[in-house]
Image (cartoon, rainbow, N blue to C red):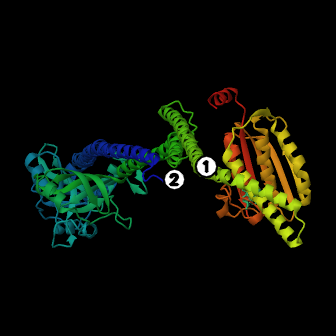
Amino acid sequence: MLTPRFPIRAKLIASFSVVIIVGVFISTMIGINLIGSTIIKQAQEKVRLDLNSAREVYLGESEIIRTKVRLTAERFFIKEAVAINDTERLRRELRAIREEEGLDILTLTDNQGRIMVRAHNPEVYGDRPIDHVIDHVLTSGESVVATVIVSEDELAKIGDDYLKRARITLIPTPKSRPLNITEERQGMFIKAGAPVFDYAGKLIGVLYGGNMLNRNYGIVDKVKNTVYLGEMYKDRDIGTATIFLDDARISTNVLNIDGERAIGTRVSEEVYEQVVVDGEPWVGRAFVVNAWYMTAYEPIRNIDGKIIGMLYVGMLEAPYIDLRNKVVVTFWGIAIISVLLLSVIAYYTTSNIVRPVKALARATEKVAHGDMSQRVDINTHDEIGFLGESFNQMTVALQEATDGYQSLTRTLEQKVAEKTKELQAAQDFLIQSEKMASLGKLAAGVAHEINNPLTSILINSHLILEKFKGDATLKDNLKLIIDETTRCSSIVNGLLEFARQTPPEKTVVDINRIIESTLIIMETQALVHKVRIKKDLAGDLPQIQIDVNKIKQVFTNLILNALDAMSDGGTLTILSRLSSGGDCVEVKFHDTGKGIPKDNISKIFDPFFSTKGTKGTGLGLSISYGIIQQHNGKIDVQSEVGKGTTITVCLPLFEFKKDKKEENSG
Ligand SMILES: Nc1ncnc2c1ncn2[C@@H]1O[C@H](COP(=O)(O)OP(=O)(O)OP(=O)(O)O)[C@@H](O)[C@H]1O
Ligand SMILES: [Mg+2]
């Protein structure tokens, strides 16, 4: 059977799978989009808020410094020591306060802004730094806090350790703006200033203090720990914060590849342009040092409003991306499981469709090759079951039609054969009858003319012989004349017999009795020929109407011929039975003699055909033929050279009406 190129099952599974895959693809797309638009947007929103929190931390820190400085400026020892110019006390006290309050710098100036005491570096004093915080306090008489840039020179005055701490090697990143300096040497400070008044309320000086932000991680770590609660994701801090001086990280908890704080690395030019140059905050994805973050940047301004750096917070993007990937993987996992499940279900459901369809296809193919016995066994109560039923009905109808057609063909063939045979027989019969008729006339004329002279020759010859007393040789010749004339006479009688065709005198008899009585006469002859006679006579044959003498003559002829054929002995079987058609009684004479050559078979019924020379007249069978013909019967011969001959005589059954008619017409 042909295997189909696109089986139904494959088609069904494929189309369902396509539906699932397309569905999952669309859902995935929607899912990713949803995550993008909600979760990631939320994350961005969160980072924006986180930046606010970070700013609060930053401002809080600033405020603390301002409070520390303000409260210190109000203390009495300063008023008293300044009044009597007790620098020694001022140095001692301020140093203690600086250490106690954890300030990097704590410095006192006079009412002109000249340095009186540097708590950290008391040796250097008397200079007047260019400092907007001092100026602001001197002019306003109020405390202030601000982020400021402190130059290298000024740092040197604070102390070498600060100079060193401030120094940061700049590390360019691929996206950072081009810059020709390789080191940051300035310091960024949160610096607070407060006025110092004497007891009369006169401004006698300015106290300022603050902390340097370079490599100071207090603020950024506080942001990390308060805003992001120090949460980690795969060994990384989720939240990070950074303070930039210009575009370089001077305080950060973003780590580099070595796991160290990425101090000195620089921000991308894009962010720098937007935040530092344009003064706009930045919120968005950014590649920070070595990973993607959701980031927010805002400018840090100095006391004059000039942008000097940036405050940054960032959240690792990885948890969100992983979440999105998880969603995608989950969706596709569901898709694959669905396709597998569907394939299994489809396999079983389609089996119920495919199996009967296959069975139908196989059966149809066999029917096409002529096997009408095909039936399919489909028990489903659906369209296919209905189809199977119709198929079975169709094959039943087809088979009936074919059977009918075949038997019709067979009967036709049979009938044609029978008719042909009948025709042949009729033709043979006609030919034979024709021959007989013409020969009969001739023979009758000749016999009539010859019979009288022969009779007188015979009578006279006998008379002569009776009275002859002479030469023995002449006497023998005379006997020969008598013999030959007798023979002539018997030929003529035979001819007359053949030609005469006197109407048969029929009586109703049992054919077996006729056979028996013929045999009584023939038995001695058979003994002489060393022929055994076997009888096979059917018991309950219907009676037939025949001319007993004539039929006896026929049987005698046939037996004599058989004996002649078995010169070295043999068996003659005589059989009687009802014919297969039931319309006549058959008598068969079967001998084991020499048989008749094929060429002779058509001639044996001809008058004078004989292979026996002077011993035979060749009239036996032709006379017999004539007699059987008179009885509306048939005589038939079958023979094989060397094996034997069977002559079959067929005599019709006695029919009363038919017989009556014949009698009337005869
Ligand atoms: N049973 C038979 N076996 C072999 N040949 C036969 C048999 N019956 C007839 N024939 C052949 O048919 C020929 C014709 O037979 P048919 O009886 O007419 O004449 P015949 O026997 O030769 O002469 P007649 O009957 O006058 O003595 C025979 O000469 C013989 O050759
Ligand atoms: Mg004969």
- Give the residue at mark 2: 1
Residue drawn at point x = 14 percent, y = 53 percent:
133
Crowding near the residue tagged with mark 1, few <14, some 14–19, many ≥20 C-alpha atoms within 10 Å: some
Observer able to see residue 542: no
Beta carbon of the mark 2 residue lies under 8 A of ligand 1: no
The kind of residue on which mark 2 rests is: Met
Instruction: Work out whether 329 lies above or below 630.
Output: below
**Corner quadrant of residue 74:** top left
Between marks 1 and 2 in the image, the one whose residue lies nearer the viewer:
1
Instruction: Work out whether 436 lies above or below 547.
Output: below
Percent x, y for residue 54? 27, 47
Q: Quadrant of ligand 1?
A: bottom right
Percent x, y for residue 608? 68, 59
Q: CA distance from mark 1 to mark 2?
A: 77 Å
Image quarter of the C terminus: top right
Q: Secondary structure at mark 1?
A: helix
Is residue 543 shown left or right of residue 254?
Answer: right
Q: Secondary structure at mark 2?
A: loop
**Image disc number at residue 309:** none
The kind of residue on which mark 1 rests is: Lys
Percent x, y for residue 61? 27, 48
Count of labels in the image:
2
- Give the residue at mark 1: 441
